[in-house]
Image: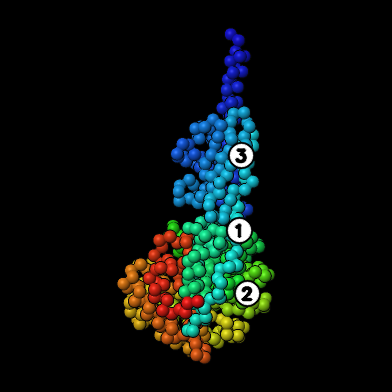
Amino acid sequence: MNLRPLILIALLATSTITHAATVTNKITGVGPKNGLINPYFCIQNGDAFAYKLAPNASTDGNKQSGNAYYVGGTLRFGGCDSSNSYLGYVGFSVNDQHNNKFSSYTPPKGVHIAYTNPAIDANGNITGNIQYTPIASNFNLLTTPPSQNTTWPFVGFNLSGLEFGKTIDPFVIPNLSKEDADGLSDLSDTQAFLKAGMNTTRVPLSWGYLQLDGPGKGDINADYYNSYVKPLLETLTSAGVNTIVDLHAYMRYSVFGKEYSGCGADGKCPDGTLILDANAYKDVWSKLYALMKNDPKINMNYILLDLVNEPVDVPNDAVFTIQTEVIKSLRQQGFQGYILVEGNSWSGLHSWTTSSWPSSDGKTTYTNATLFTRDNFIKAGVTDLSKILINVHQYLDSDYSGTHNQCQTNLKTQGADGFNLDVFVDYLRQNHLKAIVTEFGSGTDQSSCQVALQQFLNYLKDNAANGGKDYGFVGWTIWSTGHGWGNYNLRVTPTSYQMTVMQNYLQPI
């Protein structure tokens, strides 16, 4: 029997199966060079996006799509569920003649991320890059400058989203542009807050997003800064809004794509690695300050620097000494604006004098009140304290965490579990220091929380650093605003009950 024709037919069949419709996902993503987060290609078949083509994986595209000439689907980070970040819809012409070509791409509307340089070669290798695209700065945020408050120089809100997640999520990035004024924008809410009489915004940033190569290593991540941070700072400061730039880090560095900038869904709180090298903090702040200072569209007269958000379990006196080193470094570089320092134990106002920790040798017991003294600042070489602010946080629920919907209604309590408001003010008076409360919040139980919020603001008003006093409170920023929060229990909107209370302490434009 002559087997040659059969063998030839078998080889042709094998060749056809091997090469006809294979597609391979080689699209590159975002993050550090050695740890890129690459997208999934979620192949559509009928009404379903049934096949998850993982990064660097291959499949028979025609078979998975049910189409002999076309393969299309969505791009997403992390998987193909609706909860995974949507990066747009892409389609390719794919067939057994190797005449593969890119067909079309539809980016997500109002979200500044895109699939660039899309391509597919004859062997089905899908290539291209996921890139962040810049939000437009808005130099018409207000037609009238923000109001000056007669009680405090700084009154406002946190605009959160730049610090969310393990990876930069463009769906929650604060956006004040006119072009994107839809459900993914913060423009109308922010304008409403400012017109109501607020004049200050706190902007949390992730250290892991700012420096992809590690703490104090490498340049500032240009994609993150130029696309998202820069336009926000330009927009706010050009309108005369006091803008607090917050390194939202807990004195920890969180690795891009692996750890959260804060508390993770896996229960680790805070996530990341404790950093005790002052040079790492000086490095990130030096580079961040240089970018802001050299941008003519950022008005540095309205920039305040919050050195590190809510330090936790920092040993010995490092929470103080590291921040004083950063203060001196920034002053040497020419920054003359306000600098905010935070204390151990989540920088709680209520625990400023009561939460303690021992030194490594057991010879000293520290509290924030005994570390952050006028004498210690001067000994550390920070002799001008006129623009150094003690930055504290104070949530109004039972354990001061902000995770409960009900609020305490007696703010006069003292001791280990008390609010300790009077004790904190005594600390400020004794040291001739001024403070700002950059995070406070109340939950959804309006009956209890409206009472607590009014009591707290009354206390800040009664103990304001005005009338020539050299101690007391210079202001506050409530936690939090931002479209990325959804139904978060502490989210504040222009129509929420919190605004009804705060309005009594504001002077509208």
Q: CA distance from mark 1 to mark 2?
A: 21 Å
Res 186 visible: yes
In the rendered structure, which amino acid carries the disc numbered 2? Answer: Met
What residue is disc 2 on? 300
- Lower sequence index among marks 1 and 2: 1
- The residue sitting at the bottom extreme is 468
Horizontal and vertical percent for residue 451? 34, 76
Residue 134 marker: 1
- In the rendered image, the vertical position of residue 35 relative to residue 95, given as above or below: below
- Lower sequence index among marks 1 and 3: 3
Q: Badge 2: few (under 14), some or many (20 or more) residues near its Cα, within 10 Å? A: many
Judged from the image, the secondary structure of the residue bearing numbered disc 2 is helix
Horizontal and vertical percent for residue 351? 42, 77
What residue is disc 3 on? 102
- In the rendered image, the vertical position of residue 370 relative to residue 103, given as above or below: below
Q: CA distance from mark 3 to mark 2?
A: 46 Å
User: Which residue sits at x=52%, y=85%?
Assistant: 433
- The residue sitting at the top extreme is 1
In the rendered structure, which amino acid carries the disc numbered 1? Answer: Pro
Q: Quadrant of the N terminus?
A: top right
Camera-nearest residue between 444 and 386 = 444
- In the rendered image, the vertical position of residue 88 relative to residue 64, given as above or below: below
User: Which residue sits at x=59%, y=26%?
Assistant: 16
Judged from the image, the secondary structure of the residue bearing numbered disc 1 is loop
Q: Badge 1: few (under 14), some or many (20 or more) residues near its Cα, within 10 Å? A: some
